[in-house]
Image (spheres, grey):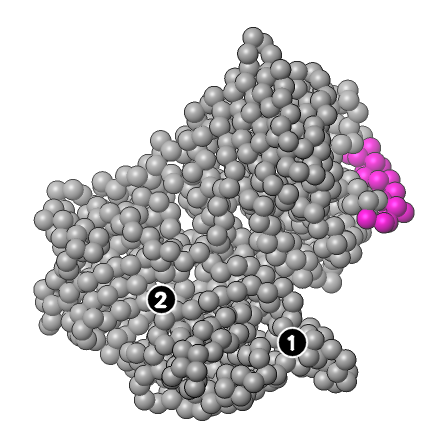
Amino acid sequence: MRTTIETDPFAAEIAGAEWHRDGIWPAQWVKPPSYEAIHLANNTPCRVPDWVTVLELEPGKFVAAYRLFVDVQSDVDVRLHVAADERYVFFLDGELQGRGSERGDANHWRFETYDLHLAAGTHVLVMQVWALGQLAPFAQHSLNPGLMVAAQDPDARRLFNTGQASWQVKVLPGYSFVDPNPAWGTGANLLIDGSQHCWGFQHGEGEGWQDVEPGEVAVNARRNDRVPSHLLQPASLPPQLSQRFTNLIVKHIEQVESAETASIPVRSDACDEPAVSLWQAMLTGDGSVEIGPHMRWRVLIDLESYVCAYPSLSVSGGDGAVIRLHWQEALYNEPDAHNKGTRNGIEGKYFTSVWTHRSAVGDIFVLDGGQNRTYDTLWWQCGRFIEIYVETHNEAVTFHRLALTETRYPLEMTGTFSSSHRGLSEVVPIMLRGLQMCSHETYMDCPFYEQLMYVGDTRLEALTTYVLTADARLPHKAIGMFDASRMQSGLTQSRYPSRVLQTIPPFSLWWVAMLYDYWYWRDDAASVQQMLSGARGVVDCFLRGMDSRGLVTAPTGWNYMDWVPAWRSGVPPDGDYGVSAVINWQLVMVLGMLAEMEGSLGEPELAMRNERIATDLAASLTSHFWVQERKLFADNLDHTLFSEHTQCLAILSHRLTPQRIRETVEGLLQAESIERTTVYFTHYLFEALTMTGHTERLLDRMKLWFDLKSQGFVTTVEEPEPSRSDCHGWGAHPLYHYYASLLGIRPGSPGFQTVEIAPQPATLTRIGGELPHPHGTIAAEFALEGGRWTGYVRLPEGLTGTLKLNEQLIPLQPGINSVH
């Protein structure tokens, strides 16, 4: 079973080694013995339907299986550390043990640790490893494809370690790859030709195995005088959730004339109802379904939820038959994929895709006619709807099972929230599911289209995680990976890990804010202090653009801020080359955060510097952008464009006078001709409304979320309709505001050493919840009775704080604190 460790397992052994031996592990990376074997397997002719275009795998990339037979004389426990470039699946005696390597980069290459109990006898370890190069997801880094296995016990190393034990490898033929468009950045989809597939490789079966070729020695970050290497680190996360998803509902079945199903609307009068019953029984484990020769069918399945899963299809017969397993978030109203309408609906709609106008993304299996064959995939797929297209030739095919194994980070809502507003509770499962589907080995912007961890998205996802669970491993990894992505300019990359570089300078500022959030919500000042130099680099990059007016010009890059329809590519006015008030106020806000961290963590001089720059910049912004007649800050120097974004960031900068705050709030709440925040940036609007005591407007702006259920959504959207993505983790941020704004629970000091509770229930008459804290659980319940709030707060042992309620500031102690 997988276990989690926090330190290098061989640190004690290599401590004190000569400098040229420091950091070396007792194992080597291994690979297939020759490119000839790789080339032969990759170029074995596969049967490919004429409606499929196959992508070429670059030289040296492969799908392979490594095997090791081990004889043990008596029962033994062994700990193994495993890594692969790019990915592996670990089987022991044919049983799945785990997957890896956890995503990182070459300087942070993760290995997983397994504790195995081996009974006396012969066992076979098999690692399926694949390296797809340019066909891999953008988030997948690679250096030199191969496998590394290292046993902890010195006596076990000759039996298990790559470079010492008798590992063999076979490059697996039968794998071809298909363009995943429109799922840009997610990596190629799969086509498996069963006639070429090495059945039973998970058990080490079959011919053609060869001895591996040893490669570079395995090393950690202490290794000096080295060529580019995988610098091994323990996996920082627990195993991904792996559980069977069983709610597969057959909605529609019909015969079709070709594989071009994207242009065929779903119509109930074309549905074969008896076939629906048969397929539903098969999916629930009751019987099988046979499709005769020379038939073409499509089957539409509704999961009634959003699911990220590894599909597995079990069939018999059907030599040459083609089965396409495609996924989609929702069906479209028209074949050219513009509008989705109600997400529950399928009648008259099309299983098609934006941009490509084809059925969707997914995998294809060409059957070999064998009995009880199980076809599965290398990577997971996702969505709500599945379309199975079946095309048989001279033989009938029998379907035995379609199994979905859900995968995601094991993120759960460990607290509770309740209120007198039913809509707030009804949307919780939608927001939670949206965040869960965007939480894996990293956070993701969306699972369907990109699967990339962007800073702007991740800040909101991490804040929401803090109020849901005490587990901060995923936020901690995210902050560290962005720190590792920093470039010579000082900026972080906009998304990381990613082998395709992209720069969004405002996202680098949000990374500094992420560091600040983590500093407050979790007690780990040491990690924050280690990354402060990176935060300084980000801020200094912006300050290099300071002009003679004391304003900062837009840095080079895509200065995305929000998907405002009037903003080209999401960039605010003058955000490309000029002076943007939005970007400048964001910088002021972040300078204040950095100053607070510097002052608390031992750098008072740097804190004073940041305070001075923030104050001066705020004064320059007020001088150049304030428009008194509108009581608003303009977005541009011409005073012709205005947005909620600028007002929110100005307020949140904590640099405005009380009078100016009152005026800005008045202008913000009354403005009609102003660009509005969309799903993502509404977080900052909610923060500004909370800071200024206007959470009644927060509830008003929750309408977009309250409407999701009636529109058939099961996760939160990327942007207002028409939304490209139906599952975007940033849309879960109102969950954070349930606790931090409405219920009013926030850290009172860094490390959550104290708590400040300042409920702002607005029009609610009852509100309560439990929020996980690193030391236990914070519980609060309040009800409005006779014009006065009553209730209680319960704090875990060792936590103190204050409660602001009924215009009083009440000290809080561990245990139950009653309010009358």
Separation of marks 2 and 1 at Cα, in angstroms: 34 Å
- Seen in the picture, residue 723 relative to 400 is either above or below; the reply is above
Residue type at mark 1: give it: Phe
Asked if residue 761 shows in the view, the reply is no
Determine crowd level at label 1: few under 14, some 14-19, many 20+ residues with C-alpha closer than 10 A. Answer: some
Closer to the N terminus: mark 2 or mark 1?
1
Residue drawn at (71%, 22%) of the image: 810
Span of residues in magenta = 601-621
Prevailing secondary structure class for the magenta stretch in the rendered image: helix
Residue drawn at (25%, 42%) of the image: 346
**On the image, numbered disc 2 is attached to which residue?**
377
**On the image, numbered disc 1 is attached to which residue?**
10
Which element type, helix, strand or loop, lies under badge 2? loop
Percent x, y of residue 649: 68, 34
Residue drawn at (17%, 52%) of the image: 281
Residue drawn at (88%, 42%) of the image: 608
Percent x, y of residue 648: 66, 31
Percent x, y of residue 296: 15, 60
